[in-house]
Amino acid sequence: MPPTDRIRDHAGQGATTVAAHRARRRLRADRARQLADLLRHQTLAGGFPDGTLPHESALAADYGATRNTVREALDLLRAEGLVARQPGVGTVVVGRKYPHGLDRLMGLAETLHEHGRVTNEVRTLGPAPAPHPVADRLRVPPGTEVLYFERLRRLNGLPLSLDLTYIPLDIGSALLGEDLENTDVFRLLETVTGRPLGHAEITLEAVNADAHSAAVLQAPRGSAALMLERLTHLADGRPVDLEFIRFRGDRISMSGLLHRSH
């Protein structure tokens, strides 16, 4: 075989070896991600009561994975702040997420009452002209004044969410003298209107925390946040509360019970 052909043949074999190596790495990364999803669920659901994960070899045996795959999965959970490595102990749970149900229309304090006390720092409060998208959702003429306020909400003193709220002024003006620092807006709305809330339309998406919200929430800039847009109506159908809520993605999890209609 001429030298040039041997070089081409060797290069071809090398390319095949590199491609196979990359394929193995991708496969291991896929398996690590899948295992991390399972371990994340166990971690958040209290599947490790003593707060310590099994040894890597035990996890490898339980899930039919290699030790390298287990290590990569644990690295993913460490990067999320859910677990940490402690010398002489192993991998321990250091983070938790609070469950926020999507089955019922409840305020944050109602939702998390089992987990501690929710307090609100009112950062901005007052009337403001409604931007067109807000006016459209609240069914008021554009430019009409609405009550606008922003709150930093904490659970047991830890920043949890940054809430921006718009309420029609005929209702919102009655909230100005109420205790917005310690009471959910939903409860106040039902009190001042004398009518129950009915339903809400929600949109939930992941966003990167901007510099302002990250600083307020004491979260890393660019970290994941859960953005909940919620338009709440009274029982008679009138929209009364438009909210844009940024939750710290590392401190909250959303869950719901869905039924398939037939």
Image (tube, rainbow, N blue to C red):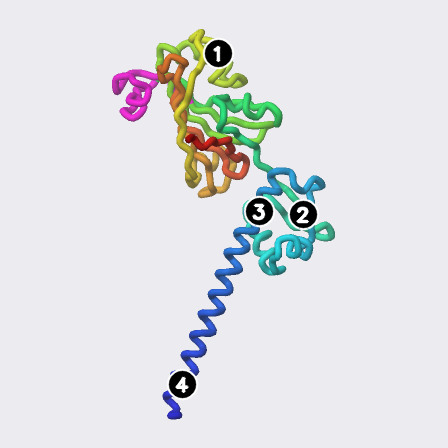
Residue 178's tag is 1
Q: Which mark is residue 38?
A: 3
Around disc 4, counting alpha carbons within 10 Å, would you say few (fewer than 14), some (14 to 19), or many (20 or more)?
A: few
**In front: mark 2 or mark 3?**
3
- Marks 4/1 in contact by CB < 8 Å: the verdict is no
Q: Nearer the viewer, residue 6 or 218?
A: 6
Instruction: Report the span colored magenta.
Output: 128-149
**What is the spatial separation of the Cα atoms under label 2 and label 4, in whole angstroms?**
51 Å
Q: Could you tell whether 144 is left or right of 223 in the image?
A: left
Residue 138's spot in the image, x, y percent?
A: 33, 19
SS category of the residue bearing label 1: loop
> The C terminus lies in which quarter of the figure?
top left
Q: Residue at x 43, y 24 (%)?
A: 150
Q: Amino acid at mark 1?
A: Glu
- Residue at 47% x, 9% y is 191
Identify the mark nearer the N-term, 2 or 3.
3
| Residue 129 belongs to the span the image colors magenta | yes
